[in-house]
Image (cartoon, grey):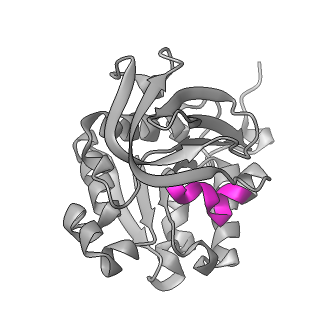
C-alpha cells in the first residue's frame, strides 16, 4: 500500500517549540508512526512544486494523510480538485486536526466545517464510542492526552457515517473527534488530535489510530475493484 503524508510544514520552520517537538516535521512523526506497517510511505509539503501532489504522485497513492493549519488559503484550487477527484475514484483520505478547515475537507463535506476552539493546555479524553470499529482496534475505553487544544461543538459537518471517538475536555466541552465518511469510492476519516505545540503524535494510542485509519481507508478493504483496475463490461465473465 502506498501512503502519502501531506503537511503544510510551516510551523516547524517558524516556531522553535514545534521544531523541538517535531524535528523531522509533523509529517515525519506521522511517517514514523506508520514505519512498522511495511507500507510504502512518502511525504509531501506545501512549498514543493504542485505542493508535492503531482498527478503521478496521487495516481500512485492509496491513502493520503492531510495536516494543515496556517496556510489553507495557499493551497491551489487545481490541486484541491485533483485530490477531490482521486478520493471519488477510491483513494483513502485521513484528515487530521486543523485540517478540518482545509479546502479539500470543506469541499468533500459541503459545509463550513467551523467549530469552537480554545488553546489552554486542556486535558483531552477521547472516548471510544464504537469499540467494534476497526479504527479503534487495540484502544481501550479511551485515549487520554494531558495537553491539547480544545475543539468544541457545534462542529459544522454532515452527520458522520460512523462516529468512532467523542472527546471530552477539562472545560466540559465535547466534540465529535473521530468521524468516517464515504464520498464516491473513497473512504474518509477525520481525527481531531494533533495541535502542533503539543507532542500528540508521540502518543502511542494516537499512533495506533493512525495505523488503523490508514488500513481502514485503504482501497484494498473495499468489495469492488481497486480504482483503475475495473475491466470493460465486455471482458467481464458471463454465467
Q: Is residue 87 left or right of residue 44?
A: right
Q: Nearer the viewer, residue 36 or 232?
A: 36
Relative to 138, is 130 on the left or the right? right
Q: Quadrant of the C terminus?
A: top right
In the image, what residue occupies the spot 74% across and 59% down? Answer: 107
User: Which contiguous range is marked in magenta?
Assistant: 98-106
The relative height of residue 160 versus residue 61 in the rendered view (above or below) is above
Q: Name the residue rendered at 66%, 68% in the picture.
A: 80
Q: Is residue 64 visible?
A: no
For the point 52% across and 32% down, the residue is 172
Rendering coords of residue 104 (x, y %):
65, 61
224 in magenta: no
106 over 7 or under it: above or below: above
Residue ID at (54%, 81%): 50
Residue 26, image x, y percentages = 33, 61
Q: Position of residue 121 (x, y in %)?
A: 36, 49
Q: Main secondary structure of the magenta part?
A: helix
- Residue in the foreground of this view, choosing between 98 and 30: 98
Residue extending farthest to the front is 171
Amino acid at each position: 500500500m502506498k501512503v502519502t503524508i501531506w503537511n503544510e510544514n510551516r510551523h516547524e520552520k517558524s516556531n522553535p517549540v514545534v521544531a523541538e517537538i517535531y524535528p523531522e516535521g509533523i509529517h515525519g512523526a506521522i511517517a514514523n508512526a506508520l514505519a512498522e506497517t511495511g507500507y510504502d510511505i512518502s511525504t509531501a509539503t506545501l512549498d514543493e512544486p504542485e505542493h508535492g501532489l503531482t498527478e503521478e504522485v496521487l495516481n500512485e497513492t492509496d491513502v493520503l494523510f492531510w495536516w494543515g493549519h496556517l496556510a489553507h488559503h495557499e493551497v491551489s484550487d487545481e490541486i484541491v480538485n485533483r485530490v477531490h477527484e482521486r478520493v471519488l475514484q477510491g483513494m483513502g483520505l485521513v484528515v487530521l486536526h486543523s485540517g478540518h478547515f482545509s479546502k479539500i475537507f470543506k469541499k468533500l463535506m459541503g459545509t463550513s466545517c467551523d467549530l469552537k476552539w480554545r488553546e489552554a493546555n486542556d486535558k483531552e479524553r477521547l472516548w471510544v464510542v464504537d469499540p467494534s470499529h476497526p479504527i479503534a482496534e487495540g484502544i481501550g475505553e479511551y485515549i487520554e492526552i494531558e495537553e491539547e487544544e480544545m475543539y468544541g461543538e457545534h462542529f459544522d459537518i454532515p452527520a458522520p457515517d460512523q462516529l468512532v471517538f467523542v472527546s471530552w475536555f477539562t472545560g466540559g466541552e465535547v466534540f465529535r473527534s473521530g468521524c468516517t465518511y464515504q464520498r464516491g469510492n473513497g473512504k474518509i476519516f477525520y481525527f481531531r488530535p494533533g495541535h502542533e505545540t503539543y507532542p500528540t503524535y508521540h502518543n502511542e494510542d494516537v499512533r495506533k489510530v493512525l495505523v488503523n485509519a490508514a488500513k481502514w481507508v485503504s482501497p484494498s478493504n473495499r468489495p469492488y475493484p481497486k480504482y483503475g483496475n475495473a475491466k470493460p463490461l465486455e471482458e467481464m465473465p458471463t454465467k
